Image (tube, helix red, strand yellow):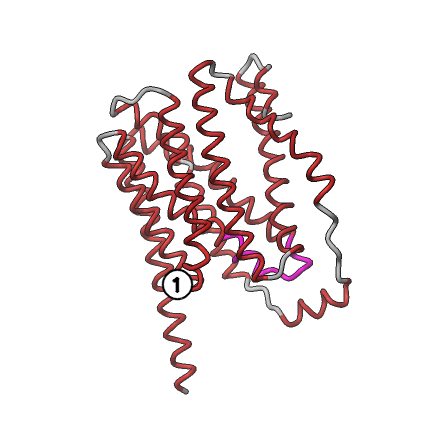
Amino acid sequence: MAGTSALLQNSLEGILVSRMLLGVAVAGTMTSVTALVGDYFTPKQRQVYMSQQGAFISLGGVIFLLTGGLLADLHWRGPFAIYAVALLLIPAVLLYLPEPLRNGAIKNLKTSVTKKFHLLGFSALLGAAMLNSLAFFLIPTQLPFLLREIGVNSPSHAGIAIAAGNLMGALASLTLFPHARKKFGKFGIFAFSFATMATGMGLISIAESYTEIILAMAIYGGGMGTLIPHIFSTGLESAVEHMRGRISGALTASVFIGQFISPFLSQPWINRFGLASAFSTAAIGLLLLATIALITRWLKTKTSTEIILR
């Protein structure tokens, strides 16, 4: 209802209020869904589900971004009508999402004793989620303007470019993420994902044609497709049962904080240095995150090897 209400708003203030309400609804949905994933599935099942969830999120992006772009060509209010699709999910939620069984306070206490919560590691995870979201939000907010600079003015073309990244993200979530996690390990997949995204973002900054933008978005989407399920599955792994709601809420908050501050950081930079510079700077930031993850993986491997040799 919050999303579709913008169809009827006649002022910027009204649209802003509706978007704020939409943000509250989306945050609540993301938090509850992530917590339910932890309740419904075992750790092994969770990995499979997270890859499938990431794929469906990306596929949804493909469908709705393309549809939104086409509707925007017809009328600027058109994309807001897409939010009405969510009403179709209400019967399915009521019928097929049972309240998870709780194991009681005693088991929670035992789990809390045997499974330690690492605040520093989780704080780093929140930071990674926020910085990733900050960089990602450059794409929906600034890519249409970058396309205009290279002579592509249609809103639907911007939607197609972003959808290309989402499509590659869906494929990466389904096919690459499960194998990459086993092969590279927890920190290795962070390094791989951030490096891939940095490559895509860097290519966007130097693109001179629409074809190059599509290619760059596909590369970026491949990294995003492995990163998002990894962030949330890693967060759930760190959470004892009674903390899953708070862990999910913190991860969701970090994502939205990154989205919120992205325009405030990027716009002054763009005003001074230009659009391409904003994307190249984001690429450098993502590459730095990849380097930190790679060094951390090397240090963890070195420490484990030394312990074994002792």
Magenta segment includes 238? yes
Image: magenta residue range: 231-244
Kind of residue indicated by mark 1? Phe
At a point 59% along the width and 26% down the height, the residue shown is 3
Q: Which residue is mark 1?
A: 184
Compared with residue 306, is residue 201 higher up or lower down, i.e. above or below?
above
Magenta segment includes 221? no
Where residue 30 sits, quadrant-wise, is top right
Where residue 159 sits, quadrant-wise, is top left
> Is the stretch drawn in magenta largely helix, strand or loop?
helix
Compared with residue 182, is residue 201 higher up or lower down, i.e. above or below?
above
Compared with residue 161, is residue 220 higher up or lower down, i.e. above or below?
below
Q: Position of residue 184 (x, y in %)?
A: 39, 63
At a point 33% along the width and 25% down the height, the residue shown is 145
At a point 44% along the width and 60% down the height, the residue shown is 181
**Image quarter of the C terminus:** bottom left
